[in-house]
Amino acid sequence: MIRIENLYAEAGEFKLININLTIKKGEYFVLLGPTGAGKTVLIECIAGLQESKKGRVILEGTDVTDFLPEKRRVGFLPQDYSLFPHMNVRQNIEFALKISRIPAEEIKRRVDSLIELLQIVPLMDRDIFTLSGGEKQRIALARALVMRPQVVLLDEPLSALDEGLRSFLCKELKRIQKETGSTFIHISHNFEEAIDVADDIGIIHEGKIMQVGKMFDIMQNPANLFVAKFLMMENIFEGKAFNKNGLARVQVGNLNLYSASKKEGEVSAVIRPDNIIISGNGKGHFPENTLTGKVTNISERIGFIKINVDAGIPFVIYSNKRELQEKEIKEGREIRFSFDPSNIHILKD
Amino acid sequence: MKKITDNTPDKPRGGGKGSESAFKVGFLIIFLAYIAGLVILFLATILFIDFATFKTCVMDPEIQFSVKLSFITATITTIIVIIIGVPSAYALSRYKIPAGTFVDTILDLPIVLPPPVVGICLLILFRHPIVKQMVATTGVEFVYTQRGIILAQFAIASAFGIRAMKAAFDSINPRLEQVARTLGCNSFQTFLHVTLPLAKNGLIAGIVMTWARSIAEFGPILFFCGATRMKTEVMPVALFLNLSIGNIEMTVAICIVMMMVSTITLIIFKKLGGKGYLW
């Protein structure tokens, strides 16, 4: 288990403010945040490459805050993989074991089983500059894993790769992590990448952890407006909430939306597009939140159809081809739609 | 006149290839004329004496002495520069040095100062009572000695060497060193197994540079060690002494030897991808 307690750090313009984080052993954790959020500073603090101003880093019960990087047993995969250019693939992978003066038979045993797992046996005698991006990543991962680290830190490992390779390598990273049982902390700014690999996700912004949890739970219940916006949620409306008979009436422009939340005052209301039901001509499923609007745009996406509706405020609704045909939804037509009050999340910053 | 709101793209304005090539040819001619001037300058000296005269001059014991003294002193100076320069260049490249600009300026001072100034500074330092006392106690004399030649060469060549070595360390991504640390290397092992092998070419280039500067040093040696025939007579001093007594052929022969040494060291420096100050 990795525990980070009240961590403060500063590196140039990047800083970390009171980071508290617990990552379970054998977990694939993705630290997600925009550029400049402090993600790299945080993993550098875990690796011991960056000094913290305050706080503690605890790896498997040992407080390593004052340990030098070489004493922490933390694997580190920088964004550019940083393979040693003066060594070939085998020398790169064996480097940590040779430095630790591990006997030759043990080095061979460890390296052989690892290179089989990572499927890099044919690359072993190649020079570094002849490798592709994906191959470099595997070699760098092998180099880190060979010393059996407590945790492997991956700094945007897929950002330099093209899209097709990225989703393939996501699956590979996940497979390798599962088969080795290692704890992985992977930092990224791409939430699709996070969905592909993560057991748990932490969202970081301006040096602070915003929310930690499963991606599904975060998407269902974003902790604040930043998280909702960062996850590119649609239908985020600013308004004023008043408590009425156990429901919050949120006034957005001329419209009133009803939420099961009890928050009041200046708020943001978030409604996921897949939680909106198009009712055709009949009464809405949820009478208190039934609206009418004009379809302004229909666009096809992979696996769904996105409908933009002007109901006084602009809504986005996700639908499918069959529903479009059955309910004769076309650009310019009026539609009626509704949503459950418990599906409106009220966020207060 | 087009209105701002008119978004019609401008049509490509054809031609212009002629002026483009005139520009290129014009600049190239200026550059080639300059290079030709340099070649003429060196050739004039090289062709001033025939090969037989050159051979006789080179076999002269005085020239032999000066070549030998130059090579020995420059080699010792270079070894000292390696010992002091490698750690200094690494520190300069990697660590935040307090009063950085000031330190940087001090380091560059021997490069930009007229060399005789450095010689006079050394002379004055060794006239200081405390230093004089130290020399008297240890019996190690520098002023007007061959030992002094090494000190004078070091005073200037070290700055050139450290600059070139720093450039070699600067070119290595510190991430590689950080990764080595996470793989179990302490800072010395990281330096030995990662930094040094990667900086190797640049460092050798710096060493070659230091050696070449040491061989060429004249100003500080003249002031600090004097120009004594067959004693402190390194090649540049031999040039000065021979020219001052009107021995032109000998002077030109030494010039040719020095041109050869400089050309070879420059070629090695460039082949190794050396960077940093070259003047």
Image (tube, helix red, strand yellow):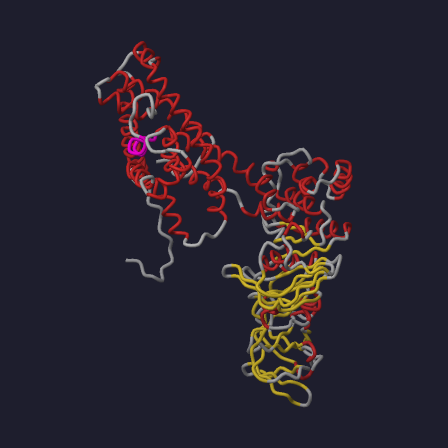
In the shown orientation, is residue B96 left or right of residue B254? right
Q: Quadrant of residue A278?
A: bottom right
How far from the left and from the top, in percent, is residue B277? 38, 38
- Nearest to the observer: residue B61 or residue A73: B61
- Nearest to the observer: residue B131 or residue B119: B131
Q: Residue furthest front?
A: B137
Q: Magenta segment range?
A: B217-225
Quadrant assignment for the C terminus of chain A? bottom right
How far from the left and from the top, in percent, is residue A157? 63, 51
Quadrant assignment for the N terminus of chain A? bottom right
Residue B15 seen in render: no
In the displayed structure, B64 sits above or below B170; it is: above
Identified at 68% across, 36% down, the residue is: A90
Q: Name the main secondary structure of what is drawn in magenta.
A: helix
Identified at 65% across, 89% down, the residue is: A244
Identified at 58% across, 40% down, the residue is: B194
Residue B4 seen in render: yes
Q: Quadrant of residue B279?
A: top left
- Nearest to the observer: residue A251 or residue B63: B63
In the displayed structure, A27 sits above or below B223; it is: below
- In reply to whether residue B219 is colored magenta, the answer given is yes
